[in-house]
Amino acid sequence: MKYAYPCVLTAGEEEGGFNVSFPDVPEALTCGDDRTEALEMAEDALVVALCAYVDNGEDIPSPGPAEDGQALVAVPPLAASKLALYTAMREQGMTAEDLAERLGLDDSAVRKLLTPDYGRGRRQSRRD
């Protein structure tokens, strides 16, 4: 699965800037002062929202096709690889404990492998 999701950029009416939403990941909402900043913020909002799916043990939503006027926002490669690992594990019915045993790793190392935004600064202290 390619982790690039179409987003809707909407010009702010009174406050200016742009609001961003994702049809396939409704939890990912953000904004920016201009289109460039909004798209930069969109990547982070998307990763955070997809992390919630992992944290809750839910399937990662598949990205739909981009429609006219929608921009594609890709998840950074490291996060995408972690999402792919998580998705493959779910498809095989494998738990994090199973992966830890198979790889000879402790639970902390497996959590790092499965946390898409681990290492981006925000979640390290919460997870470890």
Image: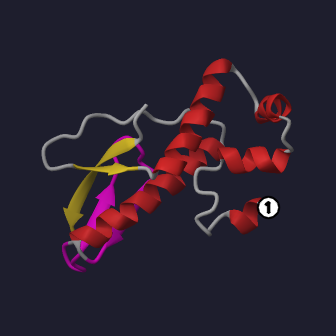
Q: Which residues are magenta?
A: 13-33
Q: Label 1: few (<14), some or many (≥20) within 10 Å? A: few
Quarter of the picture holding the N terminus: top left
Q: What residue does disc 1 label?
A: 128
Horizontal side, residue 106 vs residue 2: left or right:
right
Q: Quadrant of the C terminus?
A: bottom right
Q: Quadrant of residue 100?
A: top right
Instruction: Count numbered badges in the picture.
Output: 1
Place of residue 36 in the rendered image (x, y in percent of width and height, measured from the top left): 25, 69
Q: Residue placed at 71% from the left, 51% from the top?
A: 112
- What amino acid is labelled 1 in the image? Asp
Does 22 appear above or below 15?
A: above
The main secondary structure of the magenta stretch is loop
Q: Nearer the viewer, residue 58 or 35?
A: 35
31 to 73, vertically: above or below: below
Q: Is residue 20 magenta?
A: yes
| Farthest left residue in view | 68
Identity of the residue drawn at 62% across and 68% down: 122
- Image quarter for residue 64? top left
